[in-house]
Amino acid sequence: MKIVGAVLLILVLMFGLTWVVEGNDFFLYKYFGPRREQVRRQVFEQTRSFNQGMIQELENMQRDYIKTPDKDAKAALASIILHRASGYNLDDPDVPESLRTFIAKLKESQ
């Protein structure tokens, strides 16, 4: 009987300690969760597949911009291209110089 009581007491203490550490709103997760996700995002943005995909997407948009004869459509495409490129590191050595120049010209024109 003493063993069963001791086991139950240990379980209650473990659950109580967990609640004290995490609290009702998981305050430790609130603090560490966003930081963990930020690190995961930074690691993802450094992957080869992300960089190749972003370069390919920007080059496709560049091609569409060049082919479009309508000035309103070009303005809309320029806005989208600049928005997509704003969070991307264009100084990466994998980014073609022609793409860098194109985006720089779009920035100058707006």
Image (tube, grey):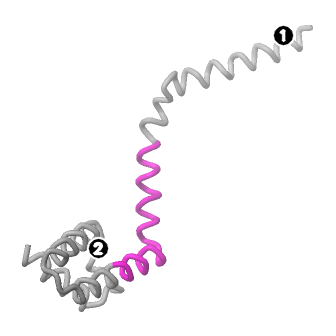
CA gap between label 1 and label 2 equals 61 Å
Q: Is residue 52 magenta?
A: yes
User: Which residues make up the magenta segment?
Assistant: 33-57
Within 10 Å of disc 2 (Cα), the crowding (few <14, some 14-19, many 20+) is few
Measured along the vertical axis of the image, is residue 40 above or below residue 53? Answer: above
Which kind of residue does numbered mark 1 sit on? Answer: Gly
From the image, give the main secondary structure of the stretch colored magenta: helix
Residue at figure coordinates x 84%, y 10% from the top left: 5
Circle 1 or circle 2, nearest the eye: 2
Q: Quadrant of residue 1?
A: top right
Q: For this view, does 76 lie left or right of residue 31?
A: left
Measured along the vertical axis of the image, is residue 28 above or below residue 56? Answer: above
Secondary structure under the numbered disc 1 in the rendered image: helix
Which kind of residue does numbered mark 2 sit on? Answer: Asn
Task: Tell me the tag on residue 89.
Answer: 2
Name the outermost residue toward the front: 70
Residue at figure coordinates x 22%, y 85% from the top left: 68
Q: Is residue 75 magenta?
A: no
Q: Position of residue 37 (x, y in %)?
A: 45, 51
Within 10 Å of disc 1 (Cα), the crowding (few <14, some 14-19, many 20+) is few
Name the outermost residue toward the top: 1
Task: Tell me the tag on residue 46.
Answer: none
Q: Position of residue 31 (x, y in %)?
A: 42, 37
The residue tagged 1 is 5
Residue at figure coordinates x 24%, y 91% from the top left: 98
